[in-house]
Amino acid sequence: MSNVQTFFAMGGYAAYVWPAYAVFFIVLIVDTVAPRLRRRRVLRELRARLARQDARQSRVRPDRASSTPITTPPSL
């Protein structure tokens, strides 16, 4: 057998070693991508919440036209 074949055979333990490498790289990729996707989702939700809040505050109700609107800070 050549050195490359010996390397890939891993001394007869290739059935255990290569899946372990695969699981490691899958976990590494998920651990890198998941926080980025979550951050995007949270920012999108915050932008939507702020847009709804701005739209709500910009509406003028006839019964409250003369009063000052009461604003509350957004809850997180």
Image: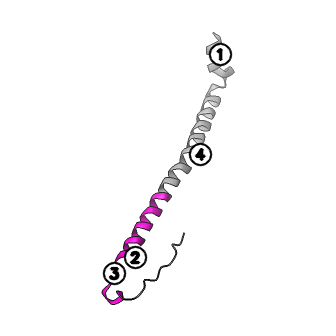
Nearer to us of marks 4 and 3 is 3
| Amino acid tagged 4 | Asp
Query: Three-letter amino acid code at disc 2?
Result: Gln
Query: In this figure, which residue is indicated by the disc labeled 2?
Result: 57
The residue positioned 42% from the left and 85% from the top of the image is: 68
**Which of the two discs, 4 and 3, labels the residue nearer the N terminus?**
4
Along the viewing direction, whichever of 67 and 72 lies nearer the viewer: 67
Q: Nearer the viewer, residue 34 or 56?
A: 56
Q: How many labels, in total?
A: 4
Give the distance between the C-alpha atoms of the residues marked 4 and 1, in whole angstroms: 32 Å
From the image, tell me which residue sits under label 3: 60
Secondary structure under tag 3 reads loop
Q: Position of residue 22 (x, y in %)?
A: 58, 34
Instruction: State yes or no: discs 4 and 3 in contact (Cβ < 8 Å).
Output: no
Label 4, on which residue? 31
Looking at the picture, which amino acid does disc 1 mark?
Thr
Q: Is residue 48 left or right of residue 17?
A: left
Discs 3, 1 touching: Cβ within 8 Å: no
Along the polypeptide, which appears first: circle 2 or circle 4? 4
